[in-house]
């Protein structure tokens, strides 16, 4: 989604730079397999699929199943639509201009993944982990999450819009230009790791007891 240019004097967080996947006009049917090299492929999944360490470029992914293994895979210019899986594992993968739209995922494991320009829209995810990930330019909009894990993640230019989550694990997270104003979160595990993030005034009010506790402040009537 194009973003509006910012004034050089703007003091707000920098918005993520998000481009739609660069896709061809025609696709060939592609079959996921370990170490596969898929280009301009339409990948229709049905059941469990193993595409560990595969290279997937300028392709479409859709379907449903129990488990999709993308461990160590490289995804560039990939459009993922209405994916319905119990588990999607993409540990230590590399994602560049990848868009998820719609669908339901039980566990989306992006631990230790290198991410540049990732967009999630209208996706329901029970457990999204980005532990140890290198994250740059991410937009999560109109999504419902149960748990979001970000321990030891490095985040630059990420934003949320009209999204909800129960718990966020921020232990050891390092962030700059992280815009949390569009994320309705019930709890952050470590509020001291929110340095570099932007919150709305009402969010700060809700987190005030946690901030006080983190700084050893006792609040009493």
Image (spheres, rainbow, N blue to C red):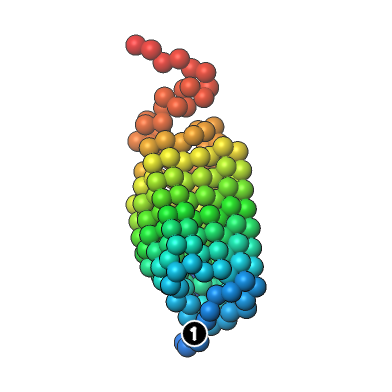
Q: Quadrant of residue 101?
A: bottom left
Viewer-proximal residue among 186 and 45: 45
User: Which x, y percent locates residue 210?
Assistant: 45, 27
User: Which x, y percent locates residue 3?
Assistant: 45, 63
Q: Quadrant of the N terminus?
A: bottom left
Can residue 187 be seen from the camera position used here? yes
Q: Is residue 76 left or right of residue 101?
A: right
Give the residue displayed 46% in from the left and 41% down from the top: 168
Determine whether the residue tagged by mark 1 lies in a helix, strand or loop: strand
Q: Is residue 54 left or right of residue 198?
A: right
Give the residue displayed 46% in from the left and 22% down from the top: 212
Q: Residues within 10 Å of mark 1 (few under 14, many from 20)?
A: few
Label 1 sits on residue: 29
Q: In the rendered image of this protein, does residue 218 appear above or below residue 75?
A: above
Can residue 96 be seen from the camera position used here? no
Q: Quadrant of the C terminus?
A: top left
Q: Quadrant of residue 219?
A: top left
Viewer-proximal residue among 136 and 129: 129
Give the residue displayed 61% in from the left and 66% down from the top: 52
Give the residue displayed 43% in from the left and 58% down from the top: 86
Viewer-proximal residue among 166 and 118: 166
């Amino acid at each position: 989604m194009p973003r509006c240019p910012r004034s050089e004097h703007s003091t707000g967080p920098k918005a993520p730079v998000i481009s739609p996947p660069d896709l061809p006009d025609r696709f060939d049917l592609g079959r996921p397999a370990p170490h596969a090299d898929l280009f301009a492929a339409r990948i229709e999944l049905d059941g469990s699929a193993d595409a560990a360490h595969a290279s997937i470029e300028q392709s479409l992914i859709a379907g449903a199943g129990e488990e999709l293994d993308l461990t160590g895979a490289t995804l560039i210019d990939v459009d993922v639509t209405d994916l319905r899986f119990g588990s999607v594992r993409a540990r230590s993968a590399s994602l560049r201009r990848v868009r998820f739209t719609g669908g339901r995922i039980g566990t989306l494991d992006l631990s230790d993944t290198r991410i540049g320009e990732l967009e999630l829209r209208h996706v329901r995810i029970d457990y999204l982990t980005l532990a140890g990930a290198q994250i740059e330019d991410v937009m999560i909009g109109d999504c419902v999450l149960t748990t979001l894990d970000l321990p030891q993640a490095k985040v630059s230019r990420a934003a949320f819009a009209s999204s909800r989550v129960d718990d966020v694990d921020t232990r050891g997270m390092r962030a700059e230009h992280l815009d949390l104003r569009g994320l309705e979160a019930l709890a952050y595990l470590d509020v001291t790791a929110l340095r570099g993030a932007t919150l709305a005034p009402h969010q700060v009010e809700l987190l005030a007891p946690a901030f006080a506790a983190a700084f050893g402040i006792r609040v009493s009537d």
